[in-house]
Image (cartoon, helix red, strand yellow):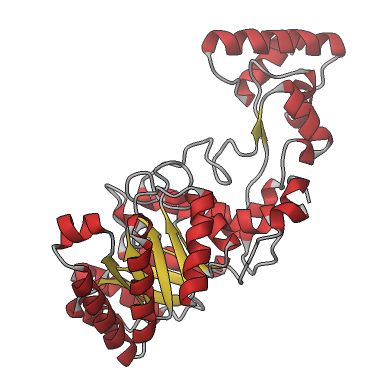
Amino acid sequence: MFVSQYNFEDEVRKDFSFAAPKINDTTLRDGEQTPGVVFSLEEKVQIARLLDEIGVQQIEAGTPAMSEEETKAVSAIVKEGLNASIMGWSRAVQSDVDAVLKTEADAIAISIATSDIHLRYKLNMTREQVLEKAASMVEYAKSHGLYVSLNSEDATRTEFAFLKEFALKGKEAGADRLRICDTLGVLIPASSRYLTRRVIEETKIPVEIHTHDDYGLAVANALAAFEAGAEWASTTVNGLGERAGNSSLEGVIMGLIKLYNLQLPFKINKICEISHYVEKASGIAVPPNRSIVGAHMFTHESGIHVDGVLKYPYTYESFLPDEIGTSRKIVIGKHSGKHAVWDKLKELGINASKEQLIKIVEIVKRNSQERKSAITDEELRKIAGKVIGK
């Protein structure tokens, strides 16, 4: 174990109430709501296959009521016969539920807002009307044999007394779980933990946490909810989603496995494969410094870091790149030291004396500084050739 030992102190873990964490991935629904992102039917099916290979327990495959094309896509995913449960998303409207039923998905997410802001300015409904609508649609979906997640949109800005009433009403109607939606990404880990625990204790309904990344806390808030007993978290590959995106599949899974040392049935060696596929299909580039899947995650340039990681990887890596299906890269540039350049030269099949190495490093640093960029392998070959005289 190469993460912080403080993660496992009794004082830190004394209030943890982990259930068996499961993932509902919504790349194909909420992820596709990223501005400008449109997946083809073939891409949706392939993403579903890759999610299933990783071991995601439930795939939110789309919103059938949106269009005939969406209905076809969800139906096609259902016909794949994957191990994962296939969920369709709907508003608390019977025609939406019927659209999900048409796809033969086995699960449905029925969503309705619960905060006073949404009730007043978006829905123009009373709390009583929301409760009635939610309960009736849950009952309708259950009567058709669907697994039901009742979604409280903007739950984290909903008065707790009403959120509790909403959860209990949904449970009474047959809902299998409550999705607590942090729609604006405005929780902090402490409040995510608090709200999740309180809902579970006072309603006894299984909880899913759905977090957004407006303040950069989506993954942290999802993990905090798991600490408090949430059974599910909603994720997207590469953190796709509206505005700043959702909690990332890779961040939540790796956090659970590495930071909490939980034994979970996810094939993490598939993480980079699906990340690359979704990056290409979505057209949304993964920032190089993104956690887990960014190109710089296992790229080292600094002389001290390179020296350390070449001697013992865990000096600057808490897990190895091949664990998630990628590889380490040593970049040569302004910050490189002799060890890094020497190792790169050996990789390129170039032998240099100590004196020649010193000269090569000097030129590398100067060229990198002047160009404000790293040195490519071909450029290093040319530099070494001039110094060595070959």
Asked if residue 267 shows in the view, the reply is: yes
Q: In front here: 217 or 61?
A: 217
Is residue 276 in view?
no
* Residue positioned most to the left: 124
Estimate the x, y position of residue 303 in percent, counting from the top left. 73, 22
Residue depicted at 46% across the width and 55% down the height: 237
Would you place residue 223 above or below residue 310 in this image? below
Is 159 in front, or is 324? 159
Residue 63 sits above or below residue 338 on the image: below
Give how far across and how far down residue 345 sits, in percent: 75, 24
In the rendered image, the quadrant that contains the C terminus is top right
Q: Quadrant of residue 156?
A: bottom left
For the point 70% across and 52% down, which residue is it? Answer: 12
Residue 345 left/right relative to 367: right
Q: Residue at x 61, y 71 (%)?
A: 19
Q: Residue furthest right?
A: 354
Horizontal and vertical percent for residue 351?
A: 82, 21
